[in-house]
Image: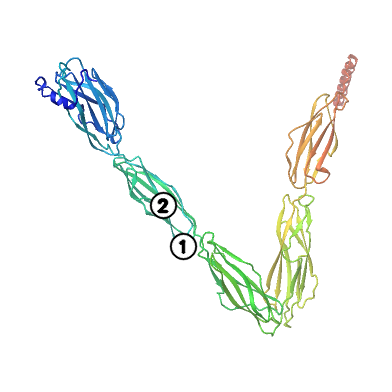
Amino acid sequence: MLKNKIQTAATGALLAMASTSALAAVSVSLSPANPTISPVGANSSTITLVFNADGVASSHQGAVRFDDTQFDVTTVTTVGAGAVCTAPVDEDGTGFVTLTYSQAQASAIPAGAVNVCTFVLDHVGASAGNFPYTFVSLLAEEPVNGDPVANTGNNGNVTVSAGPPTAPTIGYSSTTLNFPAGTAIPQNQDLNVTLTATGGVNGGATSVSCSTSSPGFSVVTGSSACTDTTCATNPLVFRCVSSNAAQTGTATCAATPTNPAGAAVNTTINLNCPAANVAPALAYNPTNGTGITMPQVGQGQTASSSIAVTPSAGSGTSTSTVSGCAFSAVSGATFNVTSGTLTFTGSGTAAQNIGFTCVAPTNGQPDGTATLTCAQTIGGGAPSNVSWPVTCPDGLPVAAPNVTYTPAGGTTITFGAGASVGASVPGSSSVAVDINGGANGGAPAPETTSVSCTATAGFTVSGGSAGPVSAPAPAGTDTTVNVSCTSGASAQAGTLTCVASQVIDGGAPTTTNTTFPLDCAAADVNITSTPGEGAITVTGAPNTSIGSAINLSNSGSASTLTCTATGSVTLGTVPATVPASGSAAVPFTCLTGAPGLNNPGTIQCTTQDLGAEGTLDYTVACIGVADVPVPAINNLGKVLMVVLVIGLGLVGLGARRQ
């Protein structure tokens, strides 16, 4: 409160008419008069509220108010003598934030500028601008009679400027784009990358430009201008053109600050585009609907033919199939389909065959006829039929004999484990070869069939040849093929191939291969111990560790080896295996006993030998042997030895003189 009660503003106006104060006048202002704040949202420097005294007034009061939506008043500090400054609340309900103050002294405040209080403005608004402030409720009076003194407020503006621009930093929603697989070739596949702009203020700007030189890829939308935190073009669009192969590439995005100008920041976008999933198209040879005539063979014999199916323009994992092949409208011959479902996947171009046969009618009879129909399915589409009319010519009046194998081709022949590496092991079965049938046309050259069987390395064939046998050939075994395996340290697989060669009228032979898989087991483990299993005697100086060893040789496959010892025996480093066709030493030491006494011990070794050598037990007798004493020579003996030496010398001298 003021020292003297100040009347209301109306009373003050009347008192101002009194002659004693008619010429008195004071004012209040801020220093600086027009404060500035930069950037938006910052604080002002310290502002001082100044009372411009006239040397008459001894007290004054008032308030200064600011736009409450733009400013908070903080850090209010009273600095003037007799002054009281009150920090305002954030909102007084009138749209203003108001700082109130008063100052009173016993005598007139000396003329001149008097600092009352200091404060700071905190800009809480969202934008730049000029925002006025005003002084209100201003009063002043002189000390003698409390006469009012005219008090004027010097209003002004608070200027808030945006501050310098900061270019935004650009982020990318993804730097690796995995495009989906296309369903056609070519096909555009687009993926978006969303830009984020952070940290940009006051019109700060960054331009973004993306490009790629990778084949199969392009940037559909690759440029954007970003101001503050907003990008004008968003998202960016990248494209892959699907093909029948997977594609990889990169795009480079340059983010270049333009306000203020700065160096570009490059970001690599990795591009991955899988092969398109396109089912292959199928081409047939002969083409769909074309008539097929089977090869002419001897009557009653089987003719074989096929239709080649070649895929093209496929990609990825999509498939096309040919299935359900069957003959219909059959007449005059027996027809059979020998192939199952054909499946073609992705970009593969290998042809597959629809196989089929017919049994030739008797010579002179009408040809056999039928229609072959198959269901073709391309990708996920509905099946459609493809078909061919097929003719089976009547058989030739002449045919070479047929060949029958027992067991039938494709049967696996197995071989047990040999006793040792290199041992010969017979097969689980032999193959009986029967060359039979055929028709002799009466020409000078007969119709013949011969068979020759061979096997891959590691196997030996006996009885592998038969023929040539002329038609007509009676049924019965012409040769029995036996196969043996040479056992190895590991299992072996092989093939027995029998080639049947048929000749008509002395012409070029027609050959047919029949195969039998061969499966030969690895040789058994075959261990021999030196010394043999049982008692081992080791001698040496009494109470001494004596070294020795057991040698295990193996003529079979490799074996594991473990050994243990008890009593006086200590094992050295025992090998973990006994190698195939090799050997391993089991080193040991034993501690001898007193002279003539046995300090016993045992050794047990375990191998994978399926026989008695699977477990080898040894009892070790470790016997101490005392040194044999050598008799000493007494004096008489020494004399006799000297005489003997002299005598021998004289005899030798006499012999030389003679």
| Disc number placed over residue 185 in the picture, else none | 1
Please state the horizontal and vertical placement of residue 140, each as a whole percent of the image: 17, 22
The answer to which quarter of the image holds residue 594 is top right
Residue type (three-letter) at the residue carrying disc 1:
Ile
Decide if residue 212 is in sight here.
no
Along the viewing direction, whichever of 638 and 629 lies nearer the viewer: 629
Q: Is residue 331 above or below residue 632?
A: below
Q: Is residue 593 visible?
A: yes
Mark 2 or mark 1, which is nearer the start of the sequence?
Answer: 1
Tell me: residue 246, above or below residue 584. Answer: below
Identify the secondary structure beneath mark 2: strand
Q: Is residue 598 left or right of residue 222?
A: right
Mark 1, secondary structure of its residue: loop
Residue 184 position within the rendered picture, expressed as x and y whole percent measured from the top left: 47, 62
Residue picked out by circle 2: 192
Does 448 sit left or right of 131 as displayed? right
Q: Position of residue 65 (x, y in %)?
A: 24, 31
Image coordinates for residue 512, horizontal then vertical, percent: 69, 70
| Of marks 1 and 2, the one in the foreground | 2
Q: Nearer the viewer, residue 127 or 13?
A: 13
Who is closer to the viewer here, 400 or 537? 400
Q: Residues within 10 Å of mark 1 (few under 14, many from 20)?
A: some
Location of residue 219 with respect to 163 vertically, above or below: below
- Label pair 1/2, CB-CB below 8 angstroms: no
Quarter of the image that includes the N terminus: top left
